Image (tube, grey):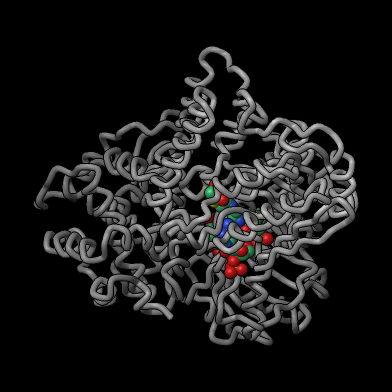
């Protein structure tokens, strides 16, 4: 970390260089305070420009320090020191001024930014609130309504919008350093604006806070930070600066030590580690400049849209001319939906669609860099596709399958240059869901695996490496989720009670509602295949429902009944009767919400430890990312593995032992017991 001071006549330029993102480590905080006293002692300096080296302005407090006791100088004092400096400071912002970075800028007398800069207070996304005056200075600078939006959403705004809000004083086109120095020269002789801390907060309309509280609570669900952030902005608007600062700091420190903040920090670092697995360090991926998708159904169309959204030209291959038309219509439908929801303008949709070429001639793929297969889940059909691809594609073209359950090793049998083959498992809807499971075969070359990770980065997805097994990481755990949900039904719980408990835990939908939405037929097909392999999947009630043609919403009934045109699930007497029949002779009990959640989540964790032990997943955090980004596991719980560790693995083992004794779950695996003894999953990974 370096902080250097340069002189441009009467202007001093303080440059912060603390890679990678100029986070406010203790050393940087100290250096900023020192810079203020050095420059205040220099009468020749009329104004100070604060600028950062590297890709961004100060991106916030150092999140890595959050697990430890705060060390002085504390950030609120650093900001106060800059605000109270004799010589006025000008923040010169490029990249992101986030969290503590924006708070430092709020301490400066002026703020300027390049047009591409973004500014925000993302603390709520880390389970905390701003802790250095963000909630107190912001309403004084831009008014309470705009401050509430910024602070409770955590979403940054661009420089133009920031200028409109009064958050920055000028947008600098061209060179930031030169522009900021010119700005500083310009203001050096002028009156200094009143420090933000001593400004009054604009009044709000009657009912404003109540309305804001309702809106924020509705969005936050069970996340604590957004409402606490709102309370802090309100306090700042209703009391003096010092009391508001004390209130903010107290809330910040309390939340910093909370379980939700620890979980969100865990996910923050897991997401940043995921794109760069250490085992691929130094491996150069193949270049991807063009892509093709085989099969234009649900997944193929979504994958084509994801590839187009990343700027790649895409060829979509289907079986015949009519299927090509249907496939293109599926892609068009995705873009029409985006236009309708206001996500993109029509012109962008047209441009994206123009970059998708449909056809049934594999000759179109002679020069394509990457081909992703998304045809029917049928080994023979997929093999036939790869046989044709082997014949027409360049030998270095990367070939991928989007299979859900088939064995990629079996699919790739006979592929020429098998080192260029891998599984790329997208999640539906593929243009939206962030998860990409990357599945190497035994033959996959390291640079082809690295290409999968590079593709994820290009598509803005979270990559997780998965080994080959039935369902890879995510769907293998999903099978346990569903089996446990059925075990609960056979021992006294109802589908509605199970779904309600899982929603209360934080999932967007319970397991039965989710199956009704997606269709029960897909899982039934998987079970049939598993039985043919000699396995014994547990789904006695689902099997009965499928035998009756109750596949979910699309057939007017599944786990629930549905009225025509109404997606609201209604408890079904037919289903209740089937459950009673299948449950005959089994012990019944009363389930509360916590019991239901344990009986579903902890067996998922048990399966996940086997997945780790078998090295189907390399890191526990990868499993957390799979469940969060592929299956809606609540981010603020950190994923199932973090949840289990936070709960205490010995307690998890004890619950599983009890459930197993009652025949309600598999007993804890040896690996889970070992992890419990060691106090964490790290003993199973690496
Ligand atoms: N603290 C510590 N490390 C951080 C960090 C932070 N605030 N922000 C990013 N990093 C690290 C990442 O872990 C990553 O490390 P690695 O290279 O070892 O994996 C590295 O910086 C680069 O991060 P990204 O891959 O995310 O880089 P990008 O260029 O894609 O994005 C960014 C840059 C937009 C700044 C993004 O990193 C980001 O959003 N960071 C978080 C910003 C944030 O949340 N700030 C608020 C912190 S809380 C706070 O300030 C409290 C205050 O109110 C008291
Ligand atoms: P789908 O049935 O909607 O689409 C399959 C498409 O492939 C159809 O349009 C069909 O015409 C086309 N097709 C079939 N044979 C072909 C061939 N020989 N050449 C060219 N096109 C051919 O199926 P869906 O849901 O899109 O699934 C595709 C693959 O993705 C499957 O392997 C499935 O397991 C997998 N998958 C599905 C997910 C889902 O949620 N639907 C999630 C992740 C993976």
Q: Quadrant of the C terminus?
A: bottom left
Q: Is residue 523 left or right of residue 115?
A: left
Q: Residue at x 55, y 36 (%)?
A: 135
Image mark count? 0
**Residue 189 in the image: x percent, y percent?**
87, 37
**Residue 487 in the image: x percent, y percent?**
23, 54
Q: Nearer the viewer, residue 662 or 170?
A: 170
Q: Is residue 686 left or right of residue 448?
A: left
**Residue 71 in the image: x percent, y percent?**
47, 58
Q: Residue at x 45, y 41 (%)?
A: 225
Q: Nearer the viewer, residue 278 or 179?
A: 179
Regarding residue 333, the answer to whether it shows in the image is no
Q: Residue at x 67, y 70 (%)?
A: 454
Q: Looking at the rendering, which quadrant does residue 652 occupy?
A: bottom left
Q: Residue at x 58, y 17 (%)?
A: 204
Q: Quadrant of the N terminus?
A: bottom right
Regarding residue 5, the answer to whether it shows in the image is yes
Q: Nearer the viewer, residue 492 or 7?
A: 7
Q: Is residue 673 left or right of residue 369?
A: left
Within the displayed image, which quadrant is ligand 2 positioned in? Answer: bottom right
**Residue 257 in the image: x percent, y percent?**
38, 52
């Amino acid at each position: 970390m370096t902080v250097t001071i340069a002189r441009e006549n009467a202007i001093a330029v303080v440059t912060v260089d603390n890679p990678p993102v100029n986070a406010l480590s203790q050393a940087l905080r100290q250096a900023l305070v020192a810079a203020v006293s050095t420059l205040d002692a220099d009468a020749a300096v009329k104004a100070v420009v604060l600028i950062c080296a590297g890709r961004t302005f100060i991106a916030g407090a150092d999140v890595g320090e959050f697990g430890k006791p705060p060390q002085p100088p504390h950030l609120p004092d650093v900001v106060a020191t800059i605000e109270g400096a004799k010589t006025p400071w000008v923040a010169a912002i490029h990249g992101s001024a986030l969290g503590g970075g924006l708070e430092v800028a709020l301490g400066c007398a002026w703020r300027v930014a390049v047009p591409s800069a973004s500014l925000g207070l993302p603390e709520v996304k880390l389970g905390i609130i701003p802790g250095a005056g963000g909630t107190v200075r912001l309403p004084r600078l831009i008014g309470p309504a705009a401050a509430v939006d910024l602070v409770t959403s955590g979403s940054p705004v661009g420089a133009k919008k920031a200028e409109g809000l009064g958050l920055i004083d000028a947008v600098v086109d061209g060179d930031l350093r030169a522009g900021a120095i010119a700005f500083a020269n310009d203001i050096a002789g002028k009156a200094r604006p009143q420090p933000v801390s001593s400004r009054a907060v604009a009044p709000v309309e009657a009912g404003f806070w109540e309305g804001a509280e309702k809106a924020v609570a509705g969005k936050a669900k069970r996340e604590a930070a957004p409402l606490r952030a709102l309370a802090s902005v309100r306090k700042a608007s209703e009391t003096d600066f010092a009391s508001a600062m004390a209130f903010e700091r107290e809330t910040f420190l309390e939340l910093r030590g909370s379980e939700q903040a620890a979980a969100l920090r865990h996910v923050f670092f897991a997401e940043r580690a995921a794109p760069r697995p250490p085992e691929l360090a130094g491996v150069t991926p193949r270049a991807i400049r063009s892509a093709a998708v085989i099969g234009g159904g649900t997944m193929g169309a979504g994958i084509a849209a994801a590839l187009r959204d990343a700027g790649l030209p895409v060829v979509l291959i289907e079986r015949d001319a009519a299927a090509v038309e249907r496939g293109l219509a599926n892609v068009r439908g995705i873009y029409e939906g985006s236009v309708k929801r206001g996500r993109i303008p029509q012109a962008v949709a047209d441009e994206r669609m123009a970059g998708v070429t449909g056809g049934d001639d594999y000759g179109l793929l002679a020069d394509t860099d990457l081909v992703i297969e998304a045809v029917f889940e049928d080994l023979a059909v997929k093999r036939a596709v790869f046989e044709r691809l082997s014949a027409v594609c360049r030998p270095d073209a990367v070939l991928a399958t989007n299979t859900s359950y088939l064995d990629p090793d079996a699919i790739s049998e006979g592929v020429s240059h098998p080192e260029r083959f891998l599984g790329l498992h997208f999640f539906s809807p593929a243009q939206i869901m962030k998860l990409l499971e990357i599945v190497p075969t035994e033959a996959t070359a390291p640079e082809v695996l690295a290409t999968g990770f590079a593709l994820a980065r290009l598509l803005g997805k979270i990559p997780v490496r998965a080994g080959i097994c039935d369902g890879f990481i995510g769907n293998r755990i999903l099978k346990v989720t569903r089996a446990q949900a059925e075990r609960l039904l056979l021992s006294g719980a109802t589908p509605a009670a199970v779904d309600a408990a899982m929603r209360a835990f934080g999932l967007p939908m319970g397991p039965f509602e989710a199956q009704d939405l997606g269709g029960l037929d897909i899982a039934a097909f998987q079970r049939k295949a598993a039985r043919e392999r000699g396995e014994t999947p547990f789904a006695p009630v689902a099997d009965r429902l499928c035998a009756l043609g109750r596949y979910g919403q699309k057939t007017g009934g599944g786990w629930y009944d549905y009225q025509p045109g109404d997606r609201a699930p209604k408890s079904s007497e037919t289903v209740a009767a089937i459950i009673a029949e299948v449950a005959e002779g089994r012990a019944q009990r009363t389930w509360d919400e916590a019991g239901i959640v344990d009986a579903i989540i902890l067996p998922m964790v048990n399966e996940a430890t086997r997945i780790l032990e078998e090295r189907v997943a390399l890191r526990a955090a990868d499993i957390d990312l799979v469940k969060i980004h592929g299956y809606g596991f609540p981010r603020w719980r950190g994923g199932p593995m973090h949840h289990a560790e936070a709960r205490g693995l010995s307690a998890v083992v004890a619950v599983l032992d009890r459930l197993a004794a009652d025949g309600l779950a598999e007993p804890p695996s040896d690996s889970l017991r070992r992890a419990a003894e060691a106090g964490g999953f790290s003993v199973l990974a690496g």
